[in-house]
Image (cartoon, helix red, strand yellow):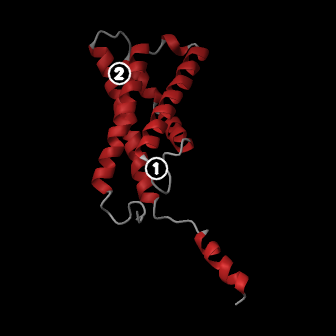
Amino acid sequence: MFPLERTVQPVILSLRMSTRSLPMVGLLGASDLLALFLAGVVGVYLRLAFGGEYAPHLYGQLWPVLGIFLLAYAAAGLYPAVGISPVDELRRICLSTSFTYMVLGAGLFLTGESETYSRGVFLITWVLSLLLVLLGRLLVRQVFASYPWWGYQVLI
């Protein structure tokens, strides 16, 4: 074996894709979906309980929007193969959730659908989304962090 081959071999071996983080990413994604769904349902019915005059079934048509949030979270780096610091995660969740709601609000305004959907529901759901996504991720970590397939061990 040539000296160059001994140097390059560890690098080539480390380029393989690890599937160890797939369960972790899947659980975080499922937690995010559930949190966003719950935020939507609670937001719709909370606003209705406080005198909202709208048809709640209209909001059921918005379920594909959940995929936009997952794409925004993935683009923000919230589903990494390795852990990110809690401060970065909080910042990324707040920014990507808020930005996605701003884009959705602008889209509703530009398409003329802003009169169909309640602004109160929109604001309540935005705040609940921030809280529930963070709480859902915390709960997932508390339950699954002790499993051997969760994350990578590090030496500090």
Viewer-nearest residue: 15 or 153? 153
Q: Which residue is mark 1?
A: 84
Residue under the point 71% across and 85% down: 3
Residue under the point 72% across and 88% down: 2
SS for tag 2?
helix
Q: Which mark is residue 44?
A: 2
Coordinates of residue 63 in the picture (x, y in percent): 45, 32
- Disc 1 crowd, CA 10 A, few/some/many (<14, 14-19, 20+): few
Q: Does the residue at mark 2 contact the one at mark 1 (Cβ under 8 Å)?
A: no
Viewer-nearest residue: 2 or 79? 2
Coordinates of residue 15 in the picture (x, y in percent): 61, 68
- Would you say 116 lies left or right of 55 here? right
Which image quarter holds the C terminus?
Answer: bottom left
Which image quarter holds the N terminus?
Answer: bottom right
Instruction: Check disc 1 and give the amino acid type.
Output: Ile
Res 64 visible? no
- Disc 2 crowd, CA 10 A, few/some/many (<14, 14-19, 20+): many
Coordinates of residue 99 in the picture (x, y in percent): 53, 28
Question: Which numbered disc, 2 or 1, marks the residue closer to the eye?
Answer: 1
